[in-house]
Image (cartoon, rainbow, N blue to C red):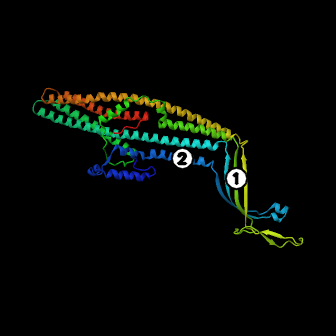
Amino acid sequence: MPIFHRRTPRAYRAALVLLALAASPAAAQGGDTLDLPLGTALQLAREGEEVGLATRRVDAATAAVGSARAAGMPSVRLGSTFSHVYENARAQAVGQIFNQPNTYNTNATLSVPLFQGGRYRNATRAAASLRDAATAEMTATELDVSVQVLQAYLGAQLAERLVAIQDTNLVLAQARVRQAEQFEAGGRGSRYDVLRARVERANLEPLAIAARGERDLALLELRRLTNLPEDAPLRLSTQLDAATVRAAAEALAGAAVADSAALEALPSVRAARLRARAGESNVRAANAARLPTVSVNLVQGYQAFPLDWSIPVRPGGLDTVDCPAGSEAGRVCTQQNGGWFSDRSLQLALSWPVWDGNRARNDLRQVRAQAAIAELEATQAVENARAAAARARTEMARARATFNTVTLTVAEAEEAFRLASLRYTRGLGTQLDVSDAQLALLTARTNEARATFDLYLATAELARALGRPLPTP
């Protein structure tokens, strides 16, 4: 279960993890060294920029679903306008009764779409498919980042192991130099044996330096993936032992080649299928754009026609005024008071794009081409997933065979080096025998460390290719 919620600020989460690492017992004993278990490294990487980008894409796709749904829902809009007429032709031609120089208008409009030809339904389906595709891609990104962290974490451990092997070889080589010098002083060895031992020790020093450089680079890559400071000293506390690797490999050894159902469940394949489905919905929505739309509009508002520039603040009405000279007796003359008069209307609107310059036709051609591309990409994703599973299985078989071979070789190389050293100490062997045995032991230990590393990563790659959970030591 994740410790932090996805919407917790990223910098805040990283700071809490760093505080937890710094407060660990190992950190307290080792000064400023951060104790970094593999689980914490995976969590820090999942809070990084790669997964963050995928999460933001999911948020954007989710918002797009809401926008698509809103297009088919009723809407209410408030509006207000003011207009001033400087010269009114109708007032000049018919009479001043039509002369209304100032007009205030405020209204609320309720629009209800009754028929859209399927655009709303298919646009919503397309947006929902794209949201699900973004979610699947986020899951695929999390898996990719997890595998990258596994590679970097175990690669750093392998580099540290190789540094220890090279340092041990240097110690043995230095001891052999001292032994050759003692044999020369006692008359049991020659100057040639001393020089040979010193040259062999000198030849091992560049290898040790190179191993330290590779370790530093591996730790730098791990810090980058986990968003830790570049100069933060780390102690990788999760150890990878041969028994764990063997158990994880045997658990997947009998797994069958991924079938169609397993391939379709993979996040990358699922995302491609969903994008193809969204393309089909977009084609139907583009087809619907050529059909008529029907909507109902209800307008409730008020209008005012003041004769001056003042803003009306009273209800509209008719005031009795004096009639013009020469009017008939008994005539009642009125004039509007410049206040607000109610204005209501109901409108049934039908819109049919009979000719739009072939825009709808070309839009349809475009979305059809995009849907065809998405379908081909989905087919390609299935083929790539099947090929990846086959490659992972082949790599798994190779790594298991290598691992089983080198495990026995190390024990034999250690015994051979012990016997060669003992024979040389008693004067029964030569310096060349000891050097050859040490070189064989160095090669065997290096191969064992690499074989363990390769087998574990091959197991992780096969688990991802088959849609299984990643094994963690």
Is residue 104 at all visible to an observer of this figure? Answer: no
* Amino acid, disc 1: Asn
252 vs 103: above or below? above
In this rendered view, identify the residue nearer to me: 64 or 120: 120
Relative placement, left or right, of 114 versus 38 is: right
Q: Which of marks 2 and 1 is in front?
A: 1
Place residue 389 in its image quadrant: top left
In this rendered view, identify the residue nearer to me: 177 or 52: 52
* Amino acid, disc 2: Thr
The residue beneath circle 2 is 62
Residue 420 placement (x, y as % from top left): 18, 28
Relative placement, left or right, of 193 versus 76 is: left
Q: Which residue is drawn at 62% across and 43% down?
A: 121
Task: Pick the quarter of the image with the C terminus.
Answer: top left
Label 2 to label 1, Cα distance in Å? 29 Å
Q: How many marks?
A: 2
Place residue 223 in its image quadrant: top left
Q: Residue furthest top?
A: 428
